[in-house]
Image (cartoon, rainbow, N blue to C red):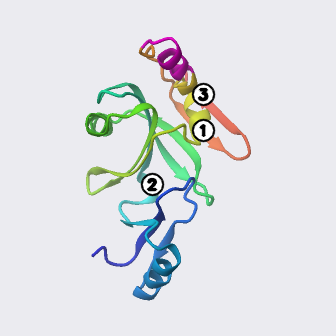
């Protein structure tokens, strides 16, 4: 058993909509009756300061053309509120391992938390994610990659990833580091 507390998540959702923290058997029984079998249970791991979003462009054969990783803070609505580009070889290796297993095709978003020294996968979203505009500002342009790959039949060219910070409110605000 997962112990208490743990999360109940809808099988299909976005921006953390419908995620509920279960604190007791009564909570679980209530949500089980309400959701039927349209949910997943997930242990709460790590902490809010060690949450990561990784955008990758999968080639469908277990490889990716490139990825971009960001440490992030979630808003109360569940989408990325703040993000900073990071270079973490261990996280990159985990994304490569997952790509070999899942064989994503096109834009794919992986979400992780660092827990007890490991990067644990929370979700895989095989689509454009809400942080697409932030990743594009840092040089990782997934719509352009889709055009290159699906329309022109070319593996997307490696992007020059810029480092910096993003803050989301109603619009995206990007600051790029020199260099």
Q: Residue at x 44, y 66 (%)?
A: 39
Where 144 falls versus 98 (above or below)?
above
Q: Nearer the viewer, residue 125 or 43?
A: 125
Q: Secondary structure at mark 3?
A: helix
First of labels 3, 1 by sequence position: 3
Q: Is residue 153 magenta?
A: yes
Q: Tell me which secondary structure the magenta stretch mostly adopts.
A: helix
List the residue tagged with mark 2: 49
Q: Residues within 10 Å of mark 2 (few under 14, many from 20)?
A: few
Where 17 falls versus 84 (above or below)?
below
Q: Nearer the viewer, residue 131 or 48?
A: 131
Quadrant assignment, res 17: bottom right
Q: Any mark on residue 166, and which?
A: 1
Q: Position of residue 84 (x, y in %)?
A: 51, 39
Quadrant assignment, res 65: top left
Give the CA separation, mark 3 to mark 1: 9 Å
Where 145 falls versus 46 (above or below)?
above
Q: Position of residue 81 (x, y in %)?
A: 60, 49
Give the CA separation, mark 2 to mark 3: 23 Å
List the residue tagged with mark 3: 137
Q: Which range is magenta?
A: 144-154
Q: Secondary structure at mark 1?
A: strand
């Amino acid at each position: 058993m997962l112990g208490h507390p743990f999360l109940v998540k809808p099988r299909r959702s976005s921006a953390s909509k419908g995620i509920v923290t279960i604190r007791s058997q009564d909570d679980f029984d209530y949500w089980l009756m309400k959701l039927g079998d349209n949910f997943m249970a997930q242990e709460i791991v790590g902490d809010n300061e060690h949450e990561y979003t990784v955008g990758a462009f999968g080639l469908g054969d277990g490889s990716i053309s490139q990825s971009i990783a960001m440490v992030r803070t979630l808003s109360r609505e569940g989408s990325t509120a703040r993000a900073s580009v990071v270079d973490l070889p261990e996280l990159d290796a985990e994304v490569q391992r997952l790509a070999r297993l899942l064989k994503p095709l096109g834009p794919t978003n992986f979400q992780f938390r660092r827990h007890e020294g490991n990067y644990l996968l929370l979700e895989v979203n095989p689509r454009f994610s809400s942080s697409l505009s932030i990743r594009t500002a840092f040089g990782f342009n997934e719509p352009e990659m889709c055009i290159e790959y699906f329309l022109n039949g070319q593996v997307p060219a490696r992007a020059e990833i810029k480092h910096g910070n993003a803050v989301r409110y109603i619009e995206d605000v990007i600051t790029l580091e020199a260099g």
